[in-house]
Image (cartoon, helix red, strand yellow):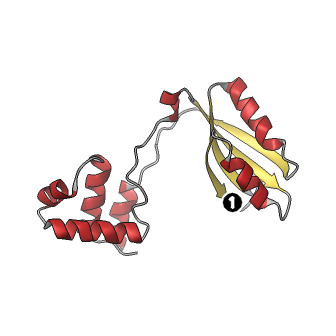
Amino acid sequence: MQIDRLDAALIRLLVETPRIGVVECSRRLAVARGTVQARLDRLREAGVIRSFGPDVDPATLGFPVTAFMTLEIRQGQGRDVRKHLECVPQVLEVHTITGRGDLLCRIVARSNAHLQQVIEGIVELDAVVRASTTIAMENPVPYRVLPLVECAVTEG
């Protein structure tokens, strides 16, 4: 989807001020309320804006350990593994990948000992052939989208 400068400005405003309303967006962007609402609707329908929910830090909930786990799974059993991973609350996201491994999981834990328990709960599935885990030490560039939004406008 192509976005323009107004779309980018609206996205930036929503990222920087997540609780802002449509009327305040229109005031700050100096455009009509209907324009803001139409842009929001279009961005949501296209999947550009996926959520207005809060950004929760797992560490503040008592899960300061973050790890990335690569899983190799038996051919034809991916659906079962995905269903299992959806039931593990410490699994924050799962990506299918190329290269060594089939799935890349971001997981969190209360401690290294708890991480071991989470890992054991995941690899106990017969469908998991091999697992490799890397513990994240820090997050110097947290998840972000605004630079990408700006890039999409200038390259689009």
Classed neighbour count for the residue bearing mark 1: other residues with Cα under 10 Å, few (<14), some (14–19), many (≥20): few
Taking the spot 54% from the left edge, 26% from the top edge, the residue there is 62
Residue 61 in the figure: left or right of residue 135 = left
Taking the spot 53% from the left edge, 33% from the top edge, the residue there is 138
Q: Nearer the viewer, residue 108 or 5?
A: 108
Up/down of 61 relative to 153, above or below = above
**Where residue 103 sits: x, y (%)?**
71, 55
Q: Which residue is mark 1?
A: 97
- Identify the secondary structure beneath mark 1: loop
Q: Quadrant of residue 146?
A: bottom left
Q: Quadrant of the C terminus?
A: bottom left
Q: Nearer the viewer, residue 120 or 8?
A: 120
Residue 135 in the figure: left or right of residue 9 = right
Mark 1: which amino acid? Ile
Q: Quadrant of residue 69?
A: top right
Residue 99 in the figure: left or right of residue 145 = right
Residue 1 in the figure: left or right of residue 120 = left
